[in-house]
Amino acid sequence: MPKYKTALVTGGAGFIGSHIVDALIRRRIKVYVVDDLSTGVKKNINPNAHFTKMSILSPLFPKLLKKINPDIVFHLAAQVNLRQSVVDPPGDARINVMGSITIAHECGKLGTKKIVYTSTGGPMYPEGARIPYSEKTPPAPISPYGISKRSAEMYFNYAYHVHGMPYVALRYANVYGPRQNAEGEAGVISIFAERMLKGQPTMITGTGKQTRDFVYVGDVVRANMAAMNRNVVGEFNIGTSRETSVNTLFKKMAKIIGYQLPERHVAAAPGEVMRSALSYKKAMKFLGWEPKVKFDDGLKKTIKWYERG
Ligand SMILES: NC(=O)c1ccc[n+]([C@@H]2O[C@H](COP(=O)([O-])OP(=O)(O)OC[C@H]3O[C@@H](n4cnc5c(N)ncnc54)[C@H](O)[C@@H]3O)[C@@H](O)[C@H]2O)c1
């Protein structure tokens, strides 16, 4: 018998959330999805999930939470775009901070058994800190997105201390895989795939020497299942510890797709982070998790999904 019989996945129509929904349903857990479909799409939602189209900011949401009274909540609904958070910090904070506080507060009162919160790795740590970033590096986010994700972690920590509601915050690296849209943190893979498959010019921003830590969505789902099953609390990096430059990514994808056009560069995005990778030592020790999918294999699976359209 699973420890948890019912789960709520906020953002379950999105890229990562929908894969978590599938994994929970495979484990015979009854799954509820709340999503306002702002960036998620209905066709991502597993037909066996109970779906309500609603914003977590709706005044009706606490009532719905009470009605569902889930054993566990996977909280992924968020404003996911770092650049958008700079354009509209209050809008980012409304969803990422206020929405998360509602969940921490209401679930704390309901006695929800566990919260698995989706945080972020790269924007959390100070640039210049030793790579790969470890959780021992004190968070020092400078973007509204990083700040809102850190605030939410702290509210879940508050709810743990005040209501005794355990939480695990998973700080993802750049997640990629099927169903990804171009807005998220590893959007570059989705943008490259769409353009290369159409034979369109594909631009690299800046020198292309900037690095990212790409982690496959299937590995991220396994991290969520470990967070559900293990008796642990706190923040965990979910990444591969490996840096891949955007130039290398371009070459790898061009080779798989058979893309012939030359590499082209455009001006770097202002404030672009030059290096990023997350150590997964803590996740390995406490969650028994490590990334398993090789980058080339994950890329092939992802490209195949884009090919199918
Ligand atoms: N993709 C990455 O590389 C990455 C890295 C680190 C963290 N994350 C986090 O992972 C989570 C999922 O991101 P994703 O990449 O799957 O993006 P996504 O845009 O596919 O998923 C976000 C989902 O949340 C929903 N949503 C947004 N605002 C909502 C609201 N107010 N009420 C209800 N639903 C709402 C969207 O419709 C969407 O389905 C987010 O919390 C994001 O910050 C993603």
Image (cartoon, rainbow, N blue to C red):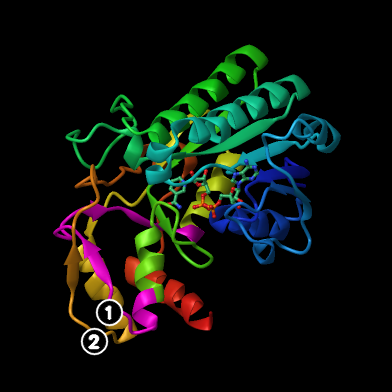
Is residue 125 toward the left or the right of residue 190 in the image?
A: left
Asked which quadrant contains residue 78, the reply is top right
Q: Which mark is residue 260?
A: 2
Give, as a three-letter code, the residue at label 2: Gln
Q: Which residues are magenta?
A: 195-218
| Residue 14 in the figure: left or right of residue 92 | right
As helix, strand or loop, the secondary structure at mark 2 comes to loop
Alpha-carbon neighbours of circle 1 within 10 Å: few (<14), some, or many (≥20)?
A: many
Percent coordinates x, y for residue 15 in the rendering: 55, 58
Dots 2, 1 in contact, CB < 8 A: yes
The residue carrying pointer 2 sits among few (fewer than 14), some (14 to 19) or many (20 or more) residues within 10 Å by Cα, namely: few
Residue 301 versus residue 227 in the image, above or below: below
**How far apart, in angstroms, are the residues tagged by discs 2 and 1?**
7 Å
**Residue 294 in sight here:** no
Asked whether 230 or 176 is in front, the reply is 176
Query: Quick check: 170 above or below 39?
Result: above
- The answer to whether residue 106 is magenta is no
Residue at the image position 38 percent from the left and 82 percent from the top:
197
Where disc 1 sits, the SS reads: helix
Q: Which mark is residue 254?
A: 1
Residue depicted at 34% across the width and 38% down the height: 123
Residue 121 lies, in percent from the top left, at 37, 40
Q: Is mark 1 within 8 Å of ligand 1?
A: no
Q: Is mark 2 within 8 Å of ligand 1?
A: no
> Of tags 2 and 1, which is closer to the observer?
2
Q: Which mark is residue 173?
A: none
Mark closer to the chain start, 2 or 1: 1
Identify the residue shown where x is 79% and y is 33%: 60
